[in-house]
Image (tube, rainbow, N blue to C red):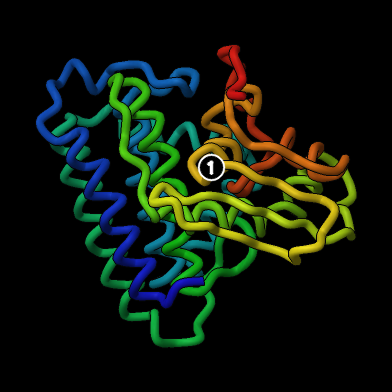
Amino acid sequence: MSEPPSVIDDLRDESEELDALVDGLAAERWATPTPAPRWTVAHQIAHLAWTDHSALLAVEDPAAFAGLVEKAVAAPDAFVDEGAEAGAARDPAELLAAWRDGRARLDKALRDAAGSRARFPWYGPPMSAASMATGRLMETWAHGQDVADALGVTRTPTGRLRHIARIGVRARPFAFGAHGLPAPDEEFRVELVLPDGAPWTYGTEDAAQRVTGPALDFCLLVTQRAHRDDLAVRATGPDADRWLDIAQAFAGPPGPGRAPRGGAPA
């Protein structure tokens, strides 16, 4: 993984890119539906603000964060939706200001912790400062994709996708477990192409189970922002093939994913 300050910088840049997309947006456009059922642009930003607050609490007050975990375990679906609903009900300018403030506070907290070996509680396994920043970047990118899709904007992919690809690969055992399936013992090889043409690889070169394709498409797949049939990600081997059907980079139960639009890339 990149050195902590680097991924924290990338989280900042990813957030600023999404911020620029909604800054100055007319109030009525905050109510634009996104691909996530029942969620508008406002819900997406509210969710990010809410999750940033949770991350800040995990870093600064683990005992208080434990209370959030108890609520999440009791009602996982309602817990997330309620946070988004509460934020989305705010005036867009207030919501945007709150998101910016929370981002700034979390940025400082992560930088302060980056040089330590501290690990912080989360809804999944405990995280280092670098891992926390990587997770926040993944969510910011994924929910930013929902906003971009809702507004009809095509984003330019960046090298920051490497962080999301790494989470997606490392979450492979979790994805199998979330579907009640045993994680394969066999090694996997993942070979992706970053937006600048550079290779990104993971796993042993001679692995029989292989996944190849553009990093953008792989990241869309593991964040469940596009259906496998619409992406140029390819699998070799039965376990790799099954993985692409169930891959997820996020904690929690499997999501419904997106319906295919048709016309899989050649």
| Residue with the mark numbered 1 | 214
| Residue 174 or residue 227, whichever sits in front | 227
| Residue 107 or residue 53, whichever sits in front | 107
Residue sticking out furthest to the top: 262
Q: Quadrant of residue 130?
A: bottom left
Left or right: where 168 falls relative to 140: right
| Residue 223 or residue 57, whichever sits in front | 223
Q: Say what amino acid the circle numbered 1 marks.
A: Pro
The quarter of the image holding the C terminus is: top right
Give the residue at x 31% y 51%.
14
Q: Quadrant of residue 83?
A: top left
Left or right: where 152 falls relative to 96: right
Query: Is 175 drawn above or below residue 106 in the view shown?
Result: above
Residue 195 rendering spot, x and y as whole percentages: 41, 47
Residue 192 rendering spot, x and y as whole percentages: 57, 50
Residue 131 rendering spot, x and y as whole percentages: 50, 67
Residue 186 rendering spot, x and y as whole percentages: 88, 59
Q: Is residue 121 visible?
A: yes
Q: Is residue 135 visible?
A: no
Badge 1 marks a residue whose secondary structure is strand
Give the residue at x 21% y 34%.
21
Query: Is 41 drawn above or below residue 61 in the view shown?
Result: above
